[in-house]
Amino acid sequence: MNHIILLFSLLLAPAFADKESQKTDQNISSNNASHKRLKRDWIWNQMHIKEEIDTPLPHHVGKITSSVRNNNAKYIIEGEYANTIFKVEETSGDVYAFERLDREKKAEYELTALIIDRRNNESLEPPSKFIIKVYDINDNVPVFVQKVFNGSVPEMSPVGTSVTKVTAVDADDPTVTGHATVTYQVIKGDEYFTVDDSGVISTTRADLDRENQSTYEIIVKAKDAPGSSGDSSTATVIITLTDINDNFPVFKQPLFHFKVPENVSVGGEVGRVKVEDVDEPQHRNTKYSFVRGDYRDTFEIVANPFTNEGIIKPKKPLDFEKVAEYRFDIEATDPTVDLRYFKSGGSRSISTVTIEVTDVDEPPVFTKLPYEFKVRENDPEVRTVGSVWAHDPDAAKRKIRFIRRRASPNGDYIRVSDTGIIQLPKPLDREFSSSYNITVAAQEILEDGRLSDRESHAQVHIIVTDENDNAPELVYPEEPRVCENAAPGKVIIRISATDKDEISPRGFFKYSLATEDSNFSLVENHDNTANITVKYGQFNRELAKTHYLPVIISDNGDPELSSTNTLVISVCKCNEKGNFTFCEERTKQVGVSIQALVAIFICIFTIIVITLLILLRKRHKKDLSGLGRNVAEIHEQLVTYDEEGGGEMDTTSYDVSVLNSVRKNGIKQEAVPSPYAQVQKPPGNITSGAGEMEMMIEVKKDEADNDRDLLPYDTLHIYGYEGAESIAESLSSLESGSSDSDIDYDFLNDWGPRFKMLAELYGSEPNEDFVY
C-alpha cells in the first residue's frame, strides 16, 4: 500500500509543480506591480523513525515542504549523513532512510533542507535545519562493566553485611519505561550471599568462618524487562573473608624440656615454647604466664612478636649447687580475642616446662661488691688498708689467689697480696690524688698449682682523707702598680689565697703584713680576700721604682699553717686623672719543667759523647800516620800527580814526612817471609839520574807484594821527583824540612795570613813531623 501511495505521489508531482510555477509567476508579476514581498515558510511534519525496522528499505521518515510555488523548485538536503543514509525526493520533499538505524549508535541526526531553482541552482528560500530522531526499542542486553568483581567481608559478620557492589549497563533508552531497567540475581553461591536490584551483594549467613573457607566465588546474572524471559549476562564475584581475632593460641606439645648451663647470663635465652594460633599474624597476641610453680622470681617468659614463641629467660643467676632442676606450668592466652565470636572448646592452654641446670666451672665470687676504704694522707703508720675476699662457688672449693689488674692513677701506690690484703707501700698524698681505684682479680688455684683461666673482678675504691699539710698561697689577677703621687688609702690591688687542702670549716684565710715599716697597709674584707692600700702616699721613683711587700697568709686549719708571699709592687708615673702613663716592664721569669731539663741534659750528654768519639777516631788515625810507627805498618794510598805541582799546597794531600824520613835515613824494610809464591820482578832499567825516590818506590812495591799481613794495595804511587843529579837540585818543598840551609824563615810569620803555610813549613824544627 505504501508503494502505491509513493508511486501516485510521484505521478502527480509535475502537475502540482506546473500549477505552482504559474502561481509563482502571477505572484511575481503581482509583486512587481505592487512592490510587495510575501513571506515564505518551510512546512513539514515532525520527523522520527524507529530503530531496527524489519521492513524492506527504504523507510519513509517524513516530508519537507516549502510555501514556494514554483514549477522549477527542487528540494535537496545537506549534512553529514545526507545523500547516504538519508535522501529526499526532489519534487515532493519526502525523506527516506536507506539504512536500518541503531539508536545505541546514534540517537538523532541533524540535516539542512534547501529549495533551489533547478534551472540556475539559485536558492529560493533560506536553508533550514531539522532533526530526525530515532525511537528506541528494547533490543540490548545488560552488560556488566567488568567480568570479575572482588569484594571482602570480615568473617563471622552478621546477616545482611554489605560485601561489594556489581554494576551492569543497558544501552537502551532509559527514558522509555522498561527498556534500561536492570535486575540482578545470584545464580551460584546464593546459599551464602544475595544481591539486590542496585547490585549490592550482602551476606545471608552469620557463621562464615575464615579458618574453614577463606574465599568464595559466586556468579551474578543481570537482565532487563522485569518479568520477561529476555536475554541476560553474568559476572563472577570473588569474595574474601578477612580475619578477626577469634581464636586462642594452643601449645603444640604438653611438655617442654630444656637444658641450660648454670653460667647462663641474666636475660639470656633458656629455651622457646611454641604455640599454634590459626588467626593471621596481626591477630596473634599471645601472653604467657605461670600457673603452678614458685619460680616467677627466677624466670620470665617473653613473647616474640614475629614468631609468637615464648622465650624463657632467667631473671637472676642460676646455681647448680643450689637448684639443679626447675619445673613449672605455664599458660598461653590471648587477651585481645573478641569474645562475641569466640568458638566453644575452652580458652586455656597449659603446658609443663622442665629446666635442667648443668654444672660448669664458675669463677670465684666476691663476698662484697664494691669495696671502699678510707685512709689518712701522709700517715706513715698505715700500711694495711683492708682486704677483699672471694670463694669458689663450685663443689671443689679451691683456694683463691688475688692479683691487681688495673689502677687509677697508674703507679705502685696500692698493692694487693696473694691473700687479698690491700697494702700501701708508702703514705698517700691527697693533693696528688684524692682517691685511688684498683681492679682486683680472683683466680682459682688448680690441683697442680696452676691458676685457672677463669677469673672474676672486684673494684676497690680508696678515699684519702685530708690533713692540713699545705700552707695557703697568694693569688692576684694582675701585677700590682701604684702611682707615685697616690693618696693615702688608695686601693692598689685586691688579693686572695688558695689552699691545696680542703677549706677549713672554721673560717676564712687571715692576711697580715710581715712588717709595718712600709708605705702600704692591708685591710681584710672578711670574704677570703684583702685589699692592699697606700699608707702615707707620695712614692719617690728616684729612690725605688719597685717595692717588695711580704704578706703572711694563715689558713685557720688544724694545725694552722701560714706562708709568707712577696708582693712586687711597681711605682709608675700617672697623669692628673690617676691613669698610668709609664711603668718599667718587669722581667718575666720563664720556668722550665723538670722533664724539659732532663731532656736537655740528655741531649747535651749525647752531643759530648759523639764529639769525644770523633776526636778519638781522628787521634787514632793521626797515630797511625806518625813517624814513630814502623815503616812496614804504613798503608800507603794511591796518589797520582797529573800536573807539575801547585806549590806548598800539594803537601796537604800526602804525609811527605814519611818519604823524607825514608830518604834521609835510608831505611830499607827487610822482606817478611811469605808462604805465598813470591814473584820476583825483574829490575827495570834505571836511567841515569834516578835517585833515592825511585829506589824507595821499588822497595815499597816489593813490600806490598811480599807482605801477607798488609792489605793488597795494588796501586802505584808516582811522584814528580827531579832527582839529586839536577844542577838546580830539587825545587820541591818535600826536602825543606831536612835542608841544611842556615836561612831563618821566621820572618814569614810577619808577612800575613797568605804566607802562613810557608811559615809553618820553613819555620819548624828539622826533626818536627808535619801532619795534615
Image: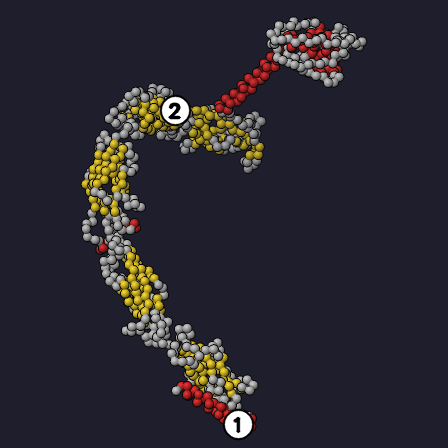
Comes first in the chain, label 1 or label 2: 1
Residue 446 relative to residue 49: left or right: left
Q: Nearer the viewer, mark 1 or mark 2?
A: 1
Q: Which residue is mark 2?
A: 429
Which one is in front, 197 or 467? 197
Q: Amino acid at mark 1?
A: Gln
Q: CA distance from mark 1 to mark 2?
A: 149 Å
Q: Residue at x 29, y 74 (%)?
A: 228
Which one is in front, 237 or 38? 237
Quarter of the view holding residue 676: top right
User: How far across and down, in percent of the image, does residue 627 sit?
Assistant: 65, 8
Kindly state the secondary structure of the residue where label 1 is placed: helix
Residue 545 relative to residue 277: left or right: right
Residue 374 shows up from this direction: no
User: How far across and down, in percent of the image, does residue 501 sit?
Assistant: 39, 27
Which one is in front, 587 or 185? 185
In the rendered view of the protein, which quadrant contains the N terminus?
bottom left
Mark 2 surroundings within 10 Å by alpha-carbon count, few (fewer than 14), some (14 through 19), many (20 or more): some
Q: Residue at x 55, y 87 (%)?
A: 119
Residue 178 shows up from this direction: yes
Q: Is residue 396 above or below residue 135?
A: above
User: How far across and down, in percent of the image, does residue 367 sit?
Assistant: 27, 28
User: How far across and down, in percent of the image, does residue 674 sit?
Assistant: 61, 7
Kindly state the secondary structure of the residue where label 2 is placed: loop
Q: Residue at x 51, y 27 (%)?
A: 568
Colouring chosen for the image of the structure: secondary structure
Whether residues under marks 1 and 2 lie with C-beta atoms below 8 angstroms apart, the answer is: no
Q: Amino acid at mark 2?
A: Asp
In the rendered view of the protein, which quadrant contains the C terminus?
top right
Q: Which residue is mark 1?
A: 26
